[in-house]
Image (spheres, rainbow, N blue to C red):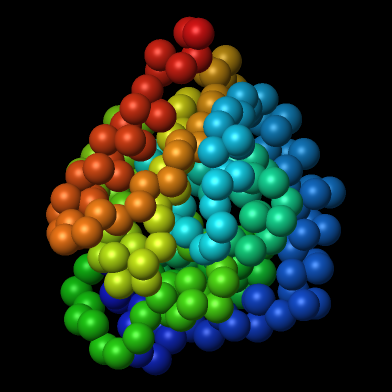
């Protein structure tokens, strides 16, 4: 996903979604409606929460992406203090195309718009500003949902963001979400697929590391976390 696409003037102003009233409403909606619904649909297994304890500041969460289930699943799996401080990069050409969709996406997921292609850097990115303000950011480096649940190539935007902000990446592996809400559907289908969300250890940028090098390390770790062998243990 091209994080730099949000640089310059926001494509859609979302700061209001991070005000105290919006955060209170979002937290209530997550705990009373969204999480119970997602958990009933997917019956997820969550692993690796202990790896979140080493985070001492903001981080860029990077995950594989195969379903509309992915974001609410990650939000529900995170401890509430982290979930309440997570902003989600969402495709501008999909979630920010009408006022109703824009407002509901921003409110429900604390989302900010990200263009997936065709944009040049214009000043300071929204994602970078959010990290500076102490927010965690969730990005899907594949840039789009997988057609079949397999892991695609990673773009370099999330790695560049980590390097520029000096923050670690927190890899997240998701397994089975494609079977519950496949690409092309908005609602769950009947499925007995096992669903798992697994948090890995933070990946800190190394001295002299390039964005491509960090990107590749991110992808390898997400691939390991999302592999189906974790369900067989």
Residue positioned 65% across, 76% down in the render: 17
Where does the image place residue 190, in percent across and percent down from the top left?
59, 22
Residue positioned 55% across, 78% down in the render: 133
Where does the image place residue 107, in percent across and percent down from the top left?
66, 69
Residue 204 in the figure: left or right of residue 156: right
| Residue 184 showing in the rendered view | no
Does residue 175 lie above or below 136 as drawn?
above
Does residue 189 lie above or below 206 as drawn?
above
Residue positioned 40% across, 14% down in the render: 229
Number of numbered discs visible in the structure rendering: 0
Residue 13 in the figure: left or right of residue 178: right
Residue 18 in the figure: left or right of residue 155: right
Which residue occupies the foreground of this view, 222 or 144?
222
Which residue occupies the foreground of this view, 111 or 57?
57
Does residue 72 lie above or below 119 as drawn?
above
Where does the image place residue 26, in percent across and percent down from the top left?
74, 63
Residue positioned 37% across, 71% down in the render: 165
| Residue 54 showing in the rendered view | yes
Q: Residue furthest front?
A: 207
- In the rendered view of the protein, which quadrant contains the N terminus? bottom left
Where does the image place residue 221, in percent across and percent down from the top left?
33, 35
């Amino acid at each position: 996903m091209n994080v730099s696409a949000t640089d310059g003037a926001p494509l859609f102003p979302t700061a209001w979604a991070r005000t105290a009233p919006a955060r209170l409403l979002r937290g209530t909606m997550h705990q009373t409606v969204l999480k119970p619904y997602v958990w009933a649909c997917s019956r997820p297994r969550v692993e690796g929460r202990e790896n979140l304890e080493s985070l001492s500041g903001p981080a860029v969460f990077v995950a594989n992406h195969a379903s509309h289930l992915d974001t609410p699943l990650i939000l529900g799996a995170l401890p509430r203090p982290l979930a309440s401080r997570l902003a989600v990069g969402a495709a501008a050409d999909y979630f920010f195309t009408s006022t109703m969709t824009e407002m509901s996406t921003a409110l429900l997921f604390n989302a900010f718009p990200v263009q997936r292609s065709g944009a040049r850097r214009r000043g300071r990115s929204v994602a970078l500003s959010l990290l500076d303000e102490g927010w965690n950011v969730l990005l899907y480096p594949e840039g789009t949902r997988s057609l079949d649940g397999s892991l695609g190539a990673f773009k370099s935007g999330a790695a560049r963001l980590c390097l520029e902000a000096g923050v670690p990446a927190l890899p997240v592996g998701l397994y089975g979400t494609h079977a519950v809400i496949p690409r092309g559907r908005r609602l769950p289908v009947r499925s007995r697929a096992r669903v798992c969300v697994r948090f890995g250890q933070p990946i800190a940028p190394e001295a002299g590391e390039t964005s491509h090098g960090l990107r590749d390390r991110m992808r390898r770790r997400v691939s390991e976390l999302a592999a189906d062998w974790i369900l067989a243990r």
